[in-house]
Image (cartoon, grey):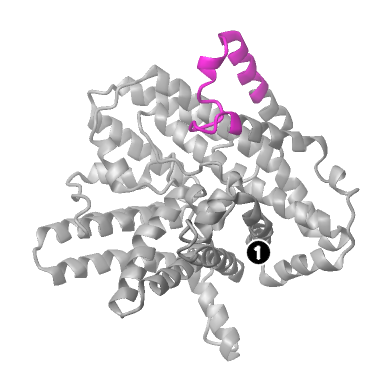
Amino acid sequence: MLFNSFDFGLFLPVVFILYWLIGPHRLKQQNILLLCTSYFFYGIWDWRFLILIFLSSIVDFYASQKIEATSKKAQKKLWLYLSVFWNLGVLFSFKYFNFFLDNFKALFDISETGFSTLNIIIPVGLSFYTFQTMSYTIDVYRNNVKPSKNILNFLCFVSFFPQLVAGPIERASRLLPQFSTTRVFNTTKAKDGLRQILWGLFKKIVVADNLGIAVSAIYATPEEFSSVTIVYAAVLFWFQLYCDFSGYADVAIGTARLFGFNLSVNFKLPYLVSTSTAFWRKWHITLSKWFQDYLFMPVVKWARKNNISKGNAKLIAIFTTMTLMGFWHGANWTYIIFGALHGCYMLFEAIPLKRKYKYKDLHAFFESYPIPSKLYFIPGLVLSVIFFRSINVTEAWHMVTAIFNSTISWYQLSTIIGWKLGFLFVMIALELFQKTKLHGLETIENLFPKYLRWAGYYVLIFMIIRYGGPQEQFIYFQF
């Protein structure tokens, strides 16, 4: 079920009314309703995948119980490995098995006989909920959280429908306790949740989907466009990706607030940054934090144990983390290259400066003087985005070479998307106006009288209905 579908428009009010009719003093019944509706929401895509998410929940729930119950470190590790191997095994089987098999056959020039790829589809949201449940077990092992004794609450934590499919990737320490806490209806939070949902739908349906039409047209026949137009398409796609994914996050966070829950912020105006290091602190924040805590820091620790210097350990961890973060997005060399490129950018930014300078490295210097960094970061981001959007490396390389081999022409730009590009400028202007807030409409109630607010809401609703592009699935659903 898509957030930008008519079905969700019917689903959400029904669940909302039933949820609050149950009342805050019937916490268990509220959680049962949330679990049932979350499984229904997810099962709409394919009911068979409910078995997978249920098994992942059960494995991690009981593994955490066993970790807590034993005092022997070896046994704790055994149960931790069971959880990690299950989650990574599920990911590998559904998402990466065919990739490795195809590359293995290509490397050793093996015929098809005896080596068959799996004819399966990737469950929606697989990468998100496996990371969420796996981090829970790791945190229990590290004594960062206590294991839940309530299986109902834990099942709700794993399957909570607003953020189940594409995040934010929540930590147990933040989200799980909210299922044990009495939730009282708050009119102010509910209204702000509705505003955030409206803002997210505007970003997705009006901005992202219209940008997507232009981007797809250029990628379909890049040879017909000039070098400037190809670069323009890459920039448009980056904004499409931002509006698509952050729009989903806005709808998810706003929907959760309707039910009394607070989800993590996942974006903080990443289009204003000047370095790759800063970019990943503001883009898909919960994923970046996940990799920092569960991959970057362990790699640094491992390198230091193997007598690698502190500086080199950090560099190894940076490149490893960013490359695997790219691979997390999909089983394709384009995503690996995307992550590795950002790893290279961050290695460049980590170059230390001499003591006579007041900045410890280039990143700190670029933070104070952003203009020089934009001279490399913007072209570097465009290059990485071309790989991210391309179907394969051949297509990506064709796009890159076309930038340098084709003519420079500006006349095509005005016809690619036309006046609808103004929607993007409206989105940017409102987010910059509210840049210290959670979303573009957060403080509108305090700034404008009621009649102006409602006029603005109706304008956004009209634009969503009238100027929305063809209904498209959220881009990050494929990951």
Instruction: Judge from the rendering whether residue 7 lies leftward or rightward of residue 466; answer left or right.
Output: left
The residue indicated by pointer 1 is 387
Q: Is residue 236 above or below residue 255?
A: below
Residue 390 visible in image:
yes
Task: Confirm whether the magenta stretch covers residue 90.
Answer: no
Which picture quadrant has residue 467? Answer: top right
The local crowd at label 1, few if under 14, some if 14 to 19, many if 20 or more residues have their Cα within 10 Å, is: many
Callout 1: SS: helix
Which picture quadrant has residue 81? Answer: bottom left
Residue drawn at point x = 52 percent, y = 16 percent: 445
Q: Nearer the viewer, residue 18 or 389?
A: 389
Q: Is residue 111 above or below residue 36?
A: below
Q: How many marks?
A: 1
Q: Position of residue 136 (x, y in %)?
A: 28, 54
Instruction: Judge from the rendering whether residue 261 lies leftward or rightward of residue 325; answer left or right.
Output: left
Q: Amino acid at mark 1?
A: Phe
Q: Position of residue 365 (x, y in %)?
A: 54, 55
The residue stretch that appears in magenta: 432-460
Q: Nearer the viewer, residue 227 or 185?
A: 227
